[in-house]
Amino acid sequence: MLYTNKKLNLVRQRRVMRVRKKLRGDSERPRLTVFKSNMHLFAQVINDQTGETLVSLGTMAKEFKGTEYARKSKKSAQVIGEKIAKMAADKNVNKVVFDRGRYKYHGIIAVLADAARQAGLQF
């Protein structure tokens, strides 16, 4: 089935909202959301009650510039998962709600989530 660009965006938005409608982050359990593009990977911890981003990190961060973690890969997902958990712990956030967005829970998304769990985040 051929989709036009407009139809494809609508299908993606519906998939995102189908997953996200059940997830809400609050001050006790903020939402850990993941976004991946063709070249990069990003993670954010968001308090949906106030609309505030508590912690964010991605492969485009200054600390990754010029390293092997500057592109989307399973290695960079592992490092981002560990660092986002450590940064969240510094903000006294230990429990989160994981929001995979429109992506299936496998590959890079699963690696990031497992690394965050091993580093101390509970979800």
Image (tube, rainbow, N blue to C red):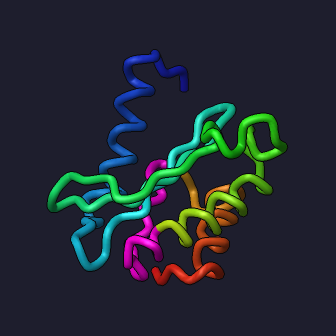
Q: Residue furthest right?
A: 68
- Residue at image position (66%, 61%) is 106
Task: Tell me where the magenta segment starts and ends, as one range.
Answer: 88-102
**Image: 84 above or below 119:** above
Tell me if residue 89 is in the magenta stretch: yes
Residue 79 relative to residue 9: left or right:
right
Tell me if residue 41 is in the magenta stretch: no
Corner quadrant of residue 93: bottom left
- Residue at image position (64%, 58%) is 80
**Image: 69 above or below 107:** above
Residue in the foreground of this view, choosing between 24 and 104:
24
Residue in the foreground of this view, choosing between 31 and 56:
56
Residue 25 relative to residue 76: left or right:
left
Residue in the foreground of this view, choosing between 72 and 101:
72
Q: Residue furthest left?
A: 49
Residue 116: x, y in percent? 59, 72
Residue 82: x, y in percent? 64, 68
Residue 72: x, y in percent? 72, 42
Residue 79 relative to residue 5: left or right:
right
Corner quadrant of residue 61: top right
Q: Quadrant of the N terminus?
A: top right
- Residue at image position (65%, 74%) is 114
Secondary structure character of the magenta stretch overall: loop
- Residue at image position (40%, 81%) is 95
Q: How many marks?
A: 0
Residue 89: x, y in percent? 47, 76
